[in-house]
Image (tube, grey):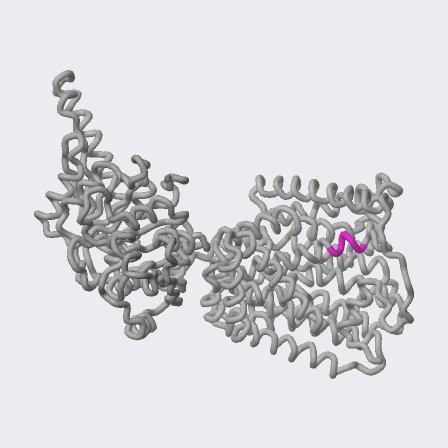
Amino acid sequence: MLISPMFTVFKTLRGCDIGSKEEEIDVSLTALEVLRFLLEFLVLLVCARVLGELARRLNQPQVIGELLAGVLIGPSLFGAISPSLFANLFPSKGAQGLLLQLIAQIGVIFLLLLSGLETNLEVVKRKLKPALTISIGSIITPFLAGYCLASLLPAALIAHPGARQIFMLFVATAMSISAIPVIVKILLDMNLMKRDIGQLILASGIINDTIGWFLLAFVSGMATSQNLQINSLMISIFGTLAFAVFCFTIGYRMIRALTKWVDNQFGGESPVFTLVVVLGLAGGAVTEALHVEAFLGSFLVGIQMARVPRITRATRIKLEGMTLAIFAPIFFATAGLKVNILQILKPELLLVLLLVIVTASLAKLVGTYAGARLARLNHWTAISLGSGMNARGAVEIIIATLGLQIGVLTTSMYTIIVIMAIATSMMAPPLLRWALRHVAPDPEEAERLQRQSLEEKSFLYGLKRMLVPVRDGRIALLAADIIQHLSGQRSIEATLLHVTTDGLPESGRINREDNFHENEKLNELVLAKSLSSIKNVEWEQKTRKLKQDEHTANVILSESERGYDLLVVGASRNKSGSSLFGHVVDYVVMESPCNVFVLYAPWRLESISLLKRILLPTTGTTNDLRTAEFAVALAKAHNAEITAIYVVETNPLKALFSSESLDMQAMESAENMGWHAISEVTRLGEASNVPVNGIVKTGTGGNVGHEIVEFSNASQQDIILLNAERRPAGGDLYCGHTVDRIVRTVKCPVGILFSKSSVFQNIQ
């Protein structure tokens, strides 16, 4: 049976004997082998993290320290000082040596999965055409340069003098392929992943690396077989392309549906995080089965997961912490373990090493530069791309290992190629940092980066899933209108929960659920048609019929525990004075595990679009700024204006016991605080081109709410948006004198945000 050239690479590396007779082998590890593995893992991790941190403090990417850690622990230093201890701790043969390689490979898969999650697909789409040109230039020029250089190298570096042509192809391939894991780590270390230049380097590197694996399959096939197996190579190429198409079409919808199901069934971040890891490994398994590197499949899956709303920033941070703190340092340190500088400490070999490094670097820079200029990129951007793409790594080590094992390279040439890979990886960060000093973001990119920076800190941007309990179609459409404007340009999920008393006897309906169930009937067909026209919101409708001993509030709270970020509730004027919004809404607000937004309308509100004047009381707290984000989003959607009001609360009794000068100083200080709080709202408005007016008023103690209502009525505000805290008060919802006064006396609608941080748990 014929074996594909690509599979030959992995067969050789992993020590598998494909096609041999099956033998029963005891592969269990002894206690000593387990201890040895734990010790080598510990030593590598500690050294990699320590030197990585040292590199960071020297203002260098951590990957430099991690690679250097492997070199120092390897045969170049530790192995030279204590050869026997090194051989016992890091055996190169047998299952013991493969364990560490397996951990390193998992590190690469997680690193590329993380890279996919951080990829901005819109930027990559815009940069795809130049990325193709750049990647082709970055391969052809180094390949030709490496081929020519290898033809001039002494025969002593070739294992078999008659195999010079194959030797030349191996050297050329090693010089032409960039190492995407190293590139990704550099981009992450230098905070370039979100920059246009970073996304372009990433896209070009992925294409370069993928072409490189196919090129390696071609070369290894020529080296190990009389007849190159074109069929197997074509299966790898077209299979990979087919998998990529699948990921961007059906695969994305499958991932989104599966994530939704897992989140609904199990809830919380841990199940979703587990799913992210499982899907990343599954993608890697597919491309590995196609005889292409596993990390490519993980990267493709990661790009799709970046588009799924339920995969939150918190999940990404978990993956980032695990990858960058543990697995990635192990991978880079393991690569450094393969370097033995002592083998080439001869003048002629050092000269060859220098020639290889210089030729590889210059050829990569020239080729990438030429491709970038053909793509009409400017001079310094082209140099930056060449600097970033210069990093080599795992691929070169694999090529060198394969060449050594099949008898093409000598141990000296193997070491030269591996050192070239390590050296170019260490050269890339400082060269890239130098070149980027001359590459400023253009206005469009600067605006995008500023927007992304605000979004990462934004409370509003973190709202991915919303729950809307509805009584009738009018309330549902008002809530839907709010959610649409809160979503902006991103995709979110919203669930409409209709709780009905249908099926209960008349005696079971009367007064049992306060004013939550109104006489208006929910027209589901009209509602569905209206919701389908709202962009960027994926709607789901659920209907729950109450049982005899079940309460509406408990049904809503039970659903809200399924991982929602925001609960949007409508409330009308409460006829009884014992509760703020009615017993059902009050109880839901008190007990909700997520953020709650209550839209209180003392009169029948038909459309949010009628709200052109928004009043925003503020004190400058974090929760007030969250409410300000709501105000800015609604104002931007309806071309409304915001008035931020700060009320200085005074104490009349204090004036009797203090001097007039002290009172003036205190008042001036309080007013300055007020204007500072208003300036924070103004800053948010300016970022979205929303005008914000400011006013500072004075109110006596306990009359802040009265001042806000007076100003609202006098200036004919259309809605008041404010933040409130949930406070226990004998089992009832109490939000303080200010909120209570506003809700009970104001003439216009009020939107109140109860942030998750202000929840008082277990209120009975």
Question: Would you say 613 lies left or right of 45 here?
Answer: left
Res 723 quadrant in image: top left
* Quadrant housing the N terminus: bottom right
Q: Residue 363, can we see it? A: no
Q: Residue 464, can we see it? A: yes
Where residue 45 appears, x then y in whole percent? 70, 44
Q: Nearer the viewer, residue 286 or 179?
A: 286
Above/below status of 356 relative to 77: below
Res 293 quadrant in image: bottom right
Q: Nearer the viewer, residue 378 or 229?
A: 229
- Which residue is painted at 58% across and 46% down in the image? 60
Question: Would you say 704 lies left or right of 413 here?
Answer: left
Report the magenta residues as a range: 98-102
Where residue 399 appears, x then y in whole percent? 76, 65
Where residue 164 appears, x then y in whole percent? 84, 72
Question: Would you say 466 lies left or right of 194 here?
Answer: left
* Quadrant housing the C terminus: top left
> Number of marks in the image?
0
Question: Would you say 623 lies left or right of 644 here?
Answer: right
- Which residue is painted at 81% across and 56% down in the image? 349
Secondary structure that dominates the magenta span = helix
Q: Nearer the viewer, residue 482 or 322?
A: 482
- Which residue is painted at 33% across and 46% down in the image? 587
Res 10 quadrant in image: bottom right
- Which residue is painted at 78% across and 52% down in the image? 339
Where residue 751 appears, x then y in whole percent? 24, 51
Residue 639 colored magenta? no
Residue lying at the far left of the rendered structure:
714
